[in-house]
Amino acid sequence: ENLQNHHDDTFYFRLLIAICPLSPLQVALSSFFIGRKRTSIPLMGTLVGNFVNLVLNYLLIFGQNELGIPELGIKGAGIATAMGQCAS
């Protein structure tokens, strides 16, 4: 089981590294809209991203048999985080 956890940890880390290039883009766009005094746009983006992350974390970490979603544990957390980041 420790070996499986190590593989899951590595998957999580690699996935977060893969989406790292999105962070400067998000900061740049947020700064642009804040500078234009349109703060509701970055706020809504952040809220949407956090909502996506919250829902997908629950579904992917613990799984939902009724929806046919398997329990993914740490891998599910990585996927949910990546999707939330992309959504914001």
Image (cartoon, rainbow, N blue to C red):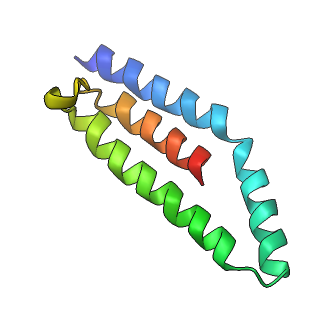
Q: Residue furthest front?
A: 67
Whether residue 73 sits left or right of residue 8 in the image: it is left
Q: Nearer the viewer, residue 39 or 4?
A: 39
Residue at the spot 38% in from the left edge and 23% down from the top edge: 8
Residue 5 in percent (x, y) is at 31, 23
Whether residue 49 sits left or right of residue 23 in the image: it is left
> Eyeballing the image, is 4 above or below 71?
above
Residue 1 quadrant: top left
> Eyeballing the image, is 70 above or below 82?
above
> Eyeballing the image, is 35 above or below 18?
below
Residue 46 in percent (x, y) is at 56, 64
Q: Residue furthest left?
A: 66
Q: Residue furthest bottom?
A: 37
Residue at the spot 72% in from the left edge and 56% down from the top edge: 26
Residue 60 in percent (x, y) is at 31, 34
Residue 80 quadrant: top left
Residue 62 in percent (x, y) is at 21, 36
> Eyeballing the image, is 67 above or below 85?
above
- The tally of labels here is 0
Residue at the spot 38% in from the left edge and 28% down from the top edge: 75
Residue at the spot 60% in from the left edge and 72% down from the top edge: 43
Locate the C terminus by quadrant.
bottom right
Residue 72 quadrant: top left
